[in-house]
Image (cartoon, grey):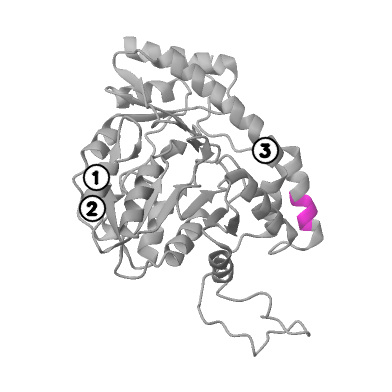
Amino acid sequence: MDAPTIDLFHPVNLPEMEAAALDVLRSGQIASGPRVLELEQAFATITGREHIVSTNDLTSAVLLALHSAGVRAGDEVATLAFSCLQSNSAISHLGARPVWIDVDPATMAMSVEDLATKLTPSVKAVMVYHIAGYPSDTVRIAALCSERGIPLIEDCNNAIGATLDGHPVGTVGDYAVYSLYPNRQINGIDGGMLATPDATTAARATRLRRFGVDGAFFRDARGEINPESDVPEIGWSAALNNLNAAVALSQLKTLSDRMARTFVVAGRLSDALSGLRRLRPVRPVRSAIPAFWGFLVLSEHRDALLLHLKTHGIKSSIFHQRNDWYTGFGTPRAKLPGTELVMKQLLALPCGWWLSDEQIQFIVDAVRAAREA
């Protein structure tokens, strides 16, 4: 009998999503429409951020955040090396250079100590990625940034539902970005969200996501391009479409229940896997509750464990490749001892609302059997 397949990620797929997509397709308002604004307003409630601008994907949201924060060609941006190209690629798109920051393996949070030593005058922004929805200590990081007048961008890529000190992650930084990629907590087919510090910045980002056009004046009374409407700052093609927005919007009513189940799964995995000699769960920073996009563990025999789990149908992952090894960034490989350990020992186990009690126990038994083998 074949081993069951247990997914590491499981995109939300609800009848409401299909109905919402069909309604938009039939309406003809596909590229733009009312669902975009509705989603932005709903997202403001979810994240605790008032000024939300939607984008076509996370990279565009990061690019707009960096640009709005004043990052230009030749500047430097402090960011984690253990991260996703989806985020860090935006730094290169602007002609800026990353300054690679280490991670604390015990918590998977950005090393505040390493960051403090690398905040030179050339660093024009700090971008902190909450790895797999495990919050970094943004309160301490924000204090460092404030002392030096540096904008802080929270990369909440897969951290919807995570909290720090009882508040949603993303509420401390000047900017925050979120992903609506299919396997995230909210499946928008694709899409991104940018939280900005004020209405003026949000209005500017709204123009820049559509080439810099001011939608209120770009068309004249005939519906033609208004020759009197200037475009003083050229932007990008980065707007979220009405179809994706409708799909994302239709599933928001299930978000709290799905996150509640995810927390239950994480608690059971934590209880069952704590105390093992050669494996230890990653412990979040003080007063933090992760979103558990994966349940992160450190294992001295990680590669053998990964192979064992995959052989038994449990989809696990070592997650990211350290980005400082990619020559496209034009930086030398950094000396990052925490990141080096993470690359050798980190493993993400399935941890989500889709797991049954039987599947949770199957994962626990498989991990214990691998340890004893």
Whether pointer 3 and pointer 2 mark residues with C-beta atoms closer than 8 Å, the reply is: no
Q: Residues within 10 Å of mark 2 (few under 14, many from 20)?
A: some
Q: From this viewpoint, which residue is outermost toward the bottom? A: 227
The stretch in magenta equals 21-25
Q: Which residue is mark 3?
A: 13
Residue 244 in view here: no
Residue flagged by tag 2: what amino acid is it? Lys
Residue 299 in the image: above or below residue 200: above
Q: Which residue is mark 1?
A: 114
Whether pointer 2 and pointer 1 mark residues with C-beta atoms closer than 8 Å, the reply is: yes
Q: Residues within 10 Å of mark 3 (few under 14, many from 20)?
A: few
Task: Between residue 110 and residue 93, name the one nearer to us.
Answer: 110
Q: Secondary structure at mark 1?
A: helix
Q: Residue 270, image x and y in percent?
A: 44, 19
Q: Which residue is mark 2?
A: 118
N-terminal-most mark, 1 or 3: 3
Q: Residue 220, image x and y in percent?
A: 73, 84
Q: Calculate the distance from the C-alpha at mark 1 to the C-alpha at mark 3.
A: 41 Å
Residue flagged by tag 3: what amino acid is it? Asn
Residue 50 in view here: yes
**Disc nearest the viewer among 3 and 2:** 2
